[in-house]
Amino acid sequence: MIQAFTETNFKAYLSTEDNRINTSVAKTQIRFLVKLINDMDGSIDYVYPTSVINNRFTEMSFTYEADTDLVDMFAGDVHLLPAGYWKYEVYEVSWIGAVTLSIEQAPSTETDVITPIGDVIGVVQGLVTKGKLYLAEKDGTAEVQYNQHETAAGTNYIYTGN
């Protein structure tokens, strides 16, 4: 499970190498397309997080972008709201030639096929891992906030009636 806070950058450490699909290319030719699905409203966000592939895990960095008009899925930007549970699916995307994350050379969804096919065009190989993301509210941003009052020095009784 990934745990993060709203309105902040976060990292995820996921196991991807044990389920790698295209082993004929180097690790440098692999990127991961992450599909984030909100459990409450079913909204879907896609992102290519900045990734570092290690032998036992992959470190993925997600960047919070406050302005929804400036969110760039190819730069690792996310604007995840509301807080709560999200499902995530991680798809392996591989290139034979130079890797370029752009709308013209990287698939935007797991079913996207870019034509004409070539060495510099990314191809979705398949699902490598999935799970849950818990997005907690950042301190001070909760919809309902409570003020704590000090305990009274004496006994407090409320009398009603005659």
Image: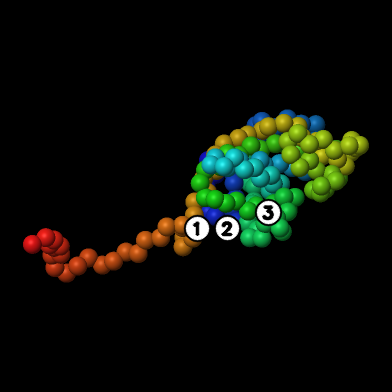
Name the residue at 63% across, 60% down: 66
Does dot 1 land on a helix, a strand or a loop?
Answer: loop
Label 2 amino acid?
Thr
Q: Mark 3 — residue?
A: 77
Would you name the residue on which mark 2 appears?
A: 8
Mark 1 touches mark 2? (CB < 8 Å): yes
Mark 1, residue position: 138
Name the foreground residue: 115 vs 131.
115
Q: CA distance from mark 1 to mark 3?
A: 18 Å
The residue shown at (66%, 33%) is 128
Quadrant of the image occupied by residue 150:
bottom left
Q: Residue at x 57, y 36 (%)?
A: 131
Q: Residue furthest front?
A: 162
Q: Position of residue 46 (x, y in %)?
A: 69, 44
115 on left or right of 107: right
Residue in the foreground of this view, choosing between 114 and 69 = 69
Residue 145, quarter of picture: bottom left
Relative to 4, residue 87 above or below: above
Q: Earlier in the sequence, mark 2 or mark 3?
A: 2
Q: Amino acid at mark 1?
A: Lys
Residue at (59, 46) in percent of width and height: 12
Q: Earlier in the sequence, mark 1 or mark 2?
A: 2
Q: Quick one: which residue is furthest to the bottom in this view?
A: 153
What distance separates the C-alpha of mark 1 from that of mark 2? 8 Å
Q: Amino acid at mark 3?
A: Asp
Number of residues whose C-alpha sits closer than 10 Å to that of mark 3, classed few (under 14), some (14–19) or many (20 or more):
many
How crowded pointer 2 is (Cα within 10 Å; few <14, some 14-19, many 20+) is rated as some
Q: Nearer the viewer, residue 83 or 47?
A: 83
The x, y position of residue 155, in whole percent, is 13, 65
